[in-house]
């Protein structure tokens, strides 16, 4: 069943990881996709893969920290299809270090991409959804937005901010029939998490693979998530099955935070 046939989905951070998995999931279910990312070549490949599934797709370089860049991408989506039904705000980075080693520049960059980027993309589509009286926004937060770990102050702060933004906008858009929810993944086997494993593992005297194995052992499900599993929850939040669900932050972490 193609639940999203005729729908238009904008995805930030579409070139890799969870964003890429979301693009492929929505394309499989019939949606037209706008892929936004700074990694131009990889982003184009994702759009090409979407087209191979029989849908239309655009690929655009977009800096989510730049208001004009985000607004231009949304406008080009409107020029192509006349609407935006779904936004997946997935663009993000990981930074982590002991607090005394976090530079102001690194702090600002993390907040700019992980939180301001989500704010700007939400801000760009919210008026459209108010006018349409429909739509779904799904913001990608993290389990680090609900709990915190040592040497991750900037990342955890940014992801907590995404949850707060989601709650507020969920209330704001509710009277217009649009929903806003966040997904909080646990450790997911993406290039970003593998990079985290190498960096944090080294601080802990482990290889990246050893760190990933340790994190899997910490999880009640005894494994890490695959990107497609996060994309499935995103698709649910964009579907008619979740029309009465808004302002929520769903943990998709194999029970990690609860444990």
Image (spheres, helix red, strand yellow):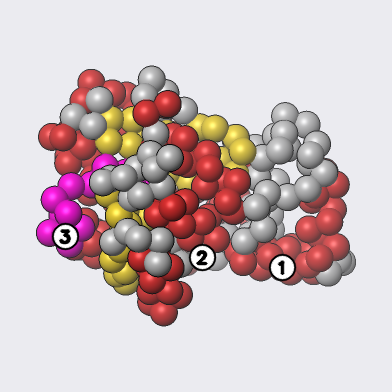
For the point 51% across and 65% down, the residue is 16
Observer-side mark, 1 or 3, equals 3
Which residue is tagged 1? Answer: 199
Q: SS for tag 1?
A: helix
Which residue is tagged 2? Answer: 16
Determine whether 62 is above or below 113 in the image: below
Instruction: Give me the C-alpha separation between circle 2 and circle 1.
Output: 19 Å
Q: Is 89 contained in the magenta span?
A: yes
31 relative to 254 in the view: left or right? left
Residues drawn in magenta: 75-91
Residue 217 location (% of width, % of height): 85, 47
For the point 29% across and 69% down, the residue is 60
In the rendering, which numbered label is found on residue 219? none
Asked if the residue under mark 2 is in contact with the one under mark 3, i.e. CB atoms within 8 Å, the reply is no
Residue 141 location (% of width, % of height): 51, 44
Determine whether 7 is above or below 129 in the image: below
Which residue is tagged 3? Answer: 80
Instruction: Give me the C-alpha separation between circle 1 and circle 3.
Output: 41 Å
Q: Examine the rendering and report whether any part of residue 37 can be seen.
A: no
Circle nearer the N terminus (2, 1): 2
């Amino acid at each position: 069943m193609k639940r999203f046939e005729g729908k238009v989905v904008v995805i930030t951070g579409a070139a890799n990881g969870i964003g890429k998995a979301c693009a492929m999931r929505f394309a499989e279910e019939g949606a037209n996709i706008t892929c936004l990312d700074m990694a131009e070549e990889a982003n184009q490949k994702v759009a090409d893969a979407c087209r191979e599934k029989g849908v239309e797709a655009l690929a655009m370089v977009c800096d989510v920290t730049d208001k004009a860049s985000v607004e231009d991408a949304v406008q080009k989506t409107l020029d192509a299809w006349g609407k935006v039904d779904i936004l997946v705000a997935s663009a993000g980075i990981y930074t982590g270090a002991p607090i005394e080693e976090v530079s102001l520049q690194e702090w600002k960059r993390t907040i700019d991409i992980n939180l301001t980027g989500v704010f700007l993309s939400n801000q760009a589509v919210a008026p459209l959804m108010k006018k349409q009286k429909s739509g779904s926004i799904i913001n990608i937060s993290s389990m680090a937005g609900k709990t915190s770990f040592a040497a991750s102050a900037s990342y955890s702060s940014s992801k907590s901010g995404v949850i707060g933004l989601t709650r507020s906008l969920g209330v704001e858009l509710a009277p217009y029939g649009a929903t806003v929810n966040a997904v909080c993944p646990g450790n997911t086997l993406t290039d970003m998490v593998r990079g985290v494993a190498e960096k944090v593992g080294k601080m802990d005297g482990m290889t990246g693979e050893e760190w990933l194995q340790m994190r899997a052992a910490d999880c009640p499900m005894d494994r890490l998530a695959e990107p497609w599993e996060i994309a499935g929850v995103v698709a649910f939040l964009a579907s008619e099955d979740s029309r009465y669900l808004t302002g929520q932050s769903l943990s998709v972490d194999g029970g990690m935070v609860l444990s």
